[in-house]
Image (cartoon, rainbow, N blue to C red):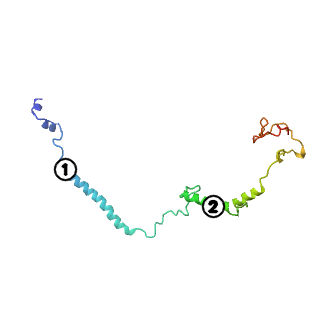
Amino acid sequence: MPEHRAETGKDLLSNLGYESRDIVMSTMVKWIIALVVLIAFGITVPAVLFFIFRGYAPTGGVPYAIDRSTNLPPEPRIQSRPRMDLREFHDREQERLDTYGRNPRTGAIHVPIQQAIDVLAARGLPVRTTGATPPDARQPDGAAAATESAPRPGDHEGIGPLGEASPRAQGGR
């Protein structure tokens, strides 16, 4: 042990296997040069190969490309242009509302909406009279219904479905 005390701190670290100085400059320069050469090689070789094989490319397009017009996926498909599709749909619907026509599948005829409103306003809507019984509620052969005294839908304590007094509350059926 006395021999270790006589040595300086720098020699002690060298004897234990530690580095005696920070870096060796010549080794660092060699690594930097090697890195630059490797990067230059990695850029130059693909560029040269690209220019060599550029002349071998087919000129008439790629024969194995997918033709989207004939090879469509099954319905429903994602809209590629939703705003334009919505505008086209609105235009078709507006044209149907404003023109005469016939549905080819059902044969139903349609008229312009404004004309339909005018005809409906001139003729009026069909109105059921207060005491009339709907045709489906009548019994065959004019027989009276067995449930004549049973409450009808909408009758609640003498009030009809629209808030007016029901015919029964007024002394009717």
Q: Nearer the viewer, mark 2 or mark 1?
A: 2
Is disc 2 placed on a helix, strand or loop?
Answer: helix
Q: Which of the 4 image quadrants contains residue 57?
A: bottom left
148 w.r.t. 55: above or below: above
Check disc 1 and report the residue beneath it: 27
Residue 140 locus on image (x, y percent) = 88, 46
Q: Residue at x 73, y 59 (%)?
A: 118
| Mark 2 vs 1: CB contact within 8 A | no
Relative placement, left or right, of 167 versus 43 is right
Residue 34 locus on image (x, y percent) = 24, 55
Q: Which mark is residue 151?
A: none
4 w.r.t. 136: above or below: above
Depth order, front residue of 64/116 = 116
Residue 171 locus on image (x, y percent) = 85, 38
Check disc 2 and report the residue beneath it: 92
- The quadrant of the rendering that contains the N terminus is top left
- Give the residue at the far left of this rendering: 6
Relative placement, left or right, of 46 versus 88 is left
Residue 113 locus on image (x, y percent) = 69, 59
Q: Residue at x 67, y 60 (%)?
A: 97
Label 1 neighbour load within 10 Å: few <14, some 14-19, many 20+: few
Depth order, front residue of 162/40 = 162
Depth order, front residue of 92/56 = 92
- Amino acid type shown at disc 2: Arg
- The quadrant of the rendering that contains the C terminus is top right
Label 2 neighbour load within 10 Å: few <14, some 14-19, many 20+: few
- Amino acid type shown at disc 1: Thr
